[in-house]
Image: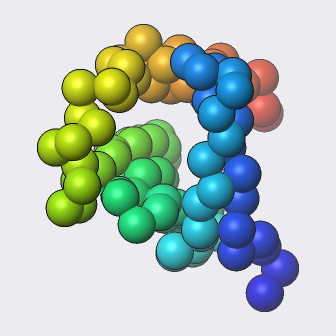
Amino acid sequence: MPWARKIRLKSKLDEKRTFKLKVKEFEPNKKLVWGDGQGNRVYTITKNGSGMVIFSMSEKIGGLMFPMYAKMIPPFDQSFEQFAADLKKESKNDEP
């Protein structure tokens, strides 16, 4: 396969932490799913009838051990918003 099956994600919220994740699904220009045994993050790109592109990102975490460490997980809202803003900015730079 031309894409990596495993990735390492360094946390900006806790720079000492690196997540070891698996790419679980990949469809070029459509969908990327990665995660670990505790959850998945899904990125999708769809084109609507007017030629616009719609990007969505969702994350689901859980598992049997999740309640034990859920309170230690910082909120990701700000980092998700920053990611979306950076992606939007970069996509506008690539417009023809």
Residue under the image location 49 percent in, 19 percent down: 79
Looking at this view, is 75 or 47 the one in front? 75
Q: Where's residue 9, x and y in %?
A: 67, 43
Please determine whether, in this image, residue 57 is positioned above or below residue 93. below
Residue 52 in view, yes or no: yes
Looking at this view, is 42 or 13 the one in front? 13
Please determine whether, in this image, residue 19 is positioned above or below residue 78. below
Which quadrant does the C terminus fall into? top right
To which quarter of the image does residue 29 belong?
bottom right
As drawn, the residue found furthest toward the front would be 68
Would residue 54 appear left or right of 72 to someone viewing this image?
right
Would residue 7 appear left or right of 26 to someone viewing this image?
right
To which quarter of the image does residue 64 belong?
bottom left
Q: Where's residue 42, x and y in %?
A: 41, 55
Residue under the image location 33 percent in, 46 percent down: 59
Display colour scheme: rainbow
To which quarter of the image does residue 57 belong?
top left
Please determine whether, in this image, residue 5 is positioned above or below residue 66. below
Q: Where's residue 65, x and y in %?
A: 24, 55
Residue 92 in view, yes or no: no
Residue under the image location 64 percent in, 33 percent down: 17
Looking at this view, is 80 or 96 the one in front? 80
Residue under the image location 69 percent in, 26 percent down: 16
Looking at this view, is 62 or 81 the one in front? 62
